[in-house]
Amino acid sequence: MADATAGGKVFTWWFWPNDTFQASDEFVMTADCFRIRLMGSIVELSYEGSGNPTPTSARELADKYAAILAKHLLVPVTLITNEEFATRTEPPFGYHNPALSRRYRNSDETAKAVRDARNEMLSSADKTLRECYDHMQDAFIALRASHSQTAAYAVYKAIEVLEDSFGGEHKATGVIGDILKKAKTAANQERHIAKKVQNQPKTSDHPVGLTQQVIRNYENHLLKIHRCTD
């Protein structure tokens, strides 16, 4: 069983081998009421519902994700608990396989595998949410490369996808909240040259962080539809 915290709603495992790749991702399985976080060699599932999940349901979903991710990485991985990880990495017999680490140094390959795995997990989920996640991944990749303007374009696309799904900015704001307009303004400022936005309201908040909040509000909206929350 995984280590469970926060009243039995958060479960964590290690990928094994643990040096296969380094990547991050986060998305919500709204039909299952679980949020999945990929944090390097750790995968965390947090239950977003109002009740309590069974450890079995969390493990089954985590195993499914691990299998799909391994398929796209082209490297076999499995999940182990924190206790198993400590046992396997305890000196002097701690495990390390540099060959596997070298194999996935290509960040583009890893990013594509992570994206493909996420979209396969969400293949029957909300299309708008999937597209938003893709645009957010593009934004984070751009930020890591210090391409702030490119990141702004990516989050602006995410906001446009949301607005289109609701039939316009006004209806989208009614569900998502005023944070949507704030994020859109910030992204628009960042992606255009100064003279084109000089008359627009200024904000010190970064558009990527604001758009994260927008998507979180949309996730909560979908979780309510799926009766995960009240």
Image (cartoon, rainbow, N blue to C red):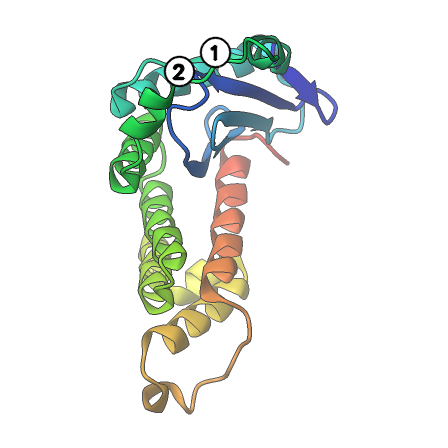
Which kind of residue does numbered mark 2 sit on?
Answer: Lys
Crowd band around label 2 with a 10 angstrom C-alpha radius: few (<14), some (14–19), many (20+) = few
Please give the name of the residue rendered at 53% of the width and 54% of the height, measured from the top-left corner: 213
Please give the name of the residue rendered at 39% of the width and 65% of the height, measured from the top-left corner: 169
Which kind of residue does numbered mark 1 sit on?
Answer: Glu
Total number of numbered discs in the rendering? 2
Position of residue 199 measured from the top left corner of the image (x, y, whole percent): 42, 91
Occupied quadrant, residue 85:
top right
For label 1, the residue is 60
Please give the name of the residue rendered at 41% of the width and 33% of the height, measured from the top-left corner: 22
For label 2, the residue is 64
Pick whichever, 45 or 123, lies toward us.
45
Position of residue 89 measured from the top left corner of the image (x, y, whole percent): 56, 14
Locate the N terminus and report the quarter of the image it occupies: top right
Query: Circle 2 sits in a helix, a strand or a loop, which is it?
Result: helix
Query: Circle 1 sits in a helix, a strand or a loop, which is it?
Result: helix
Position of residue 124 measured from the top left corner of the image (x, y, whole percent): 31, 28
In the rendered structure, the answer to whether residue 84 lies left or right of residue 73 reads right
How far apart are the two marked residues, 2 and 1, measured between alpha carbons?
6 Å
Q: Which mark is residue 13?
A: none
User: Does the CB distance between marks 2 and 1 fall below 8 Å?
Assistant: yes
Residue 156 visible? The answer is: yes
Query: In the displayed image of the protein, which residue is found farthest to the right?
Result: 7
Pick whichever, 4 or 88, lies toward us.
88
